[in-house]
Amino acid sequence: MGSSDCQRSRSERSPFLSDKSAKVFVAGHRGLVGSAIVRKLQSLGFANLLLRTHSELDLTRQADVESFFAAEKPDFVILAAAKVGGIHANNTYPADFIAINLQIQTNVIDSAYKHGVKKLLFLGSSCIYPKLAPQPIPEEALLTGSLEPTNEWYAVAKIAGIKMCQGYRIQYSWDAISGMPTNLYGPNDNFHPENSHVLPALMRRFHEAKVNGAKEVVVWGTGSPLREFLHVDDLADAVVFMMEEYSGLEHLNVGSGKEVSIKELAELVKEVVGFEGELVWDSSKPDGTPRKLMDSSKLLGMGWKPKVSLRDGLVDTYKWYTANAVTKQ
């Protein structure tokens, strides 16, 4: 990707922010990512968002997706719909993770092109990278080694989505771009006790310990692994930035660029939740990958930067959790 490709003149691109009446289809608008994008677009004054629940539009059904695009003719598409899950779910339902994601991506991307969408942004995940990728992980690490076996079904589908956007750009000169976010958290996250990610899992455990008056919370491992987290509102901000500023062949990493140890994270969550008991590390249990950080210097070099600190983001997420998720448990 040459600099001329991503810094093309405005006359060659379709400026996103100049027309707030444009029809914008946010696929997956009820999820962690999609709901944040909707909040961001609404706050910017976009008045013509196209939103469909799964029961209203099943994105795995090609004919239904074609009919939707033919009838609604969106100007822009942000593809945040996906079947997601933890290690257990990926191991149990590998067919679902590859088939459903390939179906959603293929149907939406192809219909968007056929029905005159000006620009599409496809969102993936950091799991597209090889298990033993260099740290921090640059975009160029894609397809340079074997994937993490526990989620390769999902990762292969997401890689196919990147390649599909690239293929349509090369063959049809169509403005399809891809963004790969790091670990995300925030309102509408999954706090399920069995299949949630580390941050919401810690928040739920500390909250329940506080409510039940427990004396301690035991966490697996030593707390030494380093991880990167991005508040989903920062991702939504990056999505708008990319829709306005980026038109390149290569996918872009979207991360905070800041590392935190699991130990520091757990202590911060404990403090935000207000759990007064003891935090105990069970070092007989595995730690997982020692370091996972994405190199987001390309996006940062274009002028985007995250705004939500980890502490502020945790406070915001805990407020949402106590107001919404706790009542449903």
Image (tube, rainbow, N blue to C red):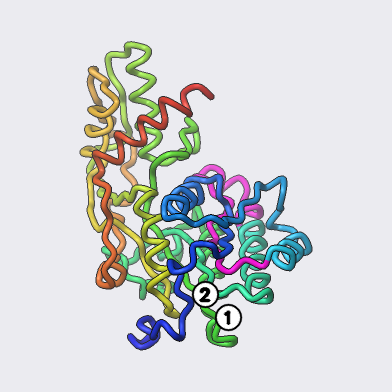
Q: Secondary structure at mark 1?
A: helix
Q: Is residue 156 above or below residue 285?
A: below
Look at the picture and state if 156 lies above or below 289.
Answer: below
Q: Residue at x 55, y 67 (%)?
A: 76
Residue 185 location (% of width, % of height) = 38, 44
Front-most of residues 41 and 312: 41
Q: Residues within 10 Å of mark 1 (few under 14, many from 20)?
A: some
- For the residues marked 2 and 1, what is the alpha-carbon distance in whole angstroms? 7 Å
Asked whether 91 falls inside the magenta stretch, the response is yes
> At 45% across and 74% down in the image, what residue appears?
15
Instruction: Pick whichever, 110 or 278, lies toward us.
Output: 110
Residue at the top extreme?
Answer: 213
- Magenta segment boundaries in residue numbering: 73-97
Q: Secondary structure at mark 2?
A: strand
Whether tag 2 and tag 1 are in contact, CB under 8 A, the answer is yes
Residue 81: % across, % down: 57, 55
**Residue type for callout 2:** Ala
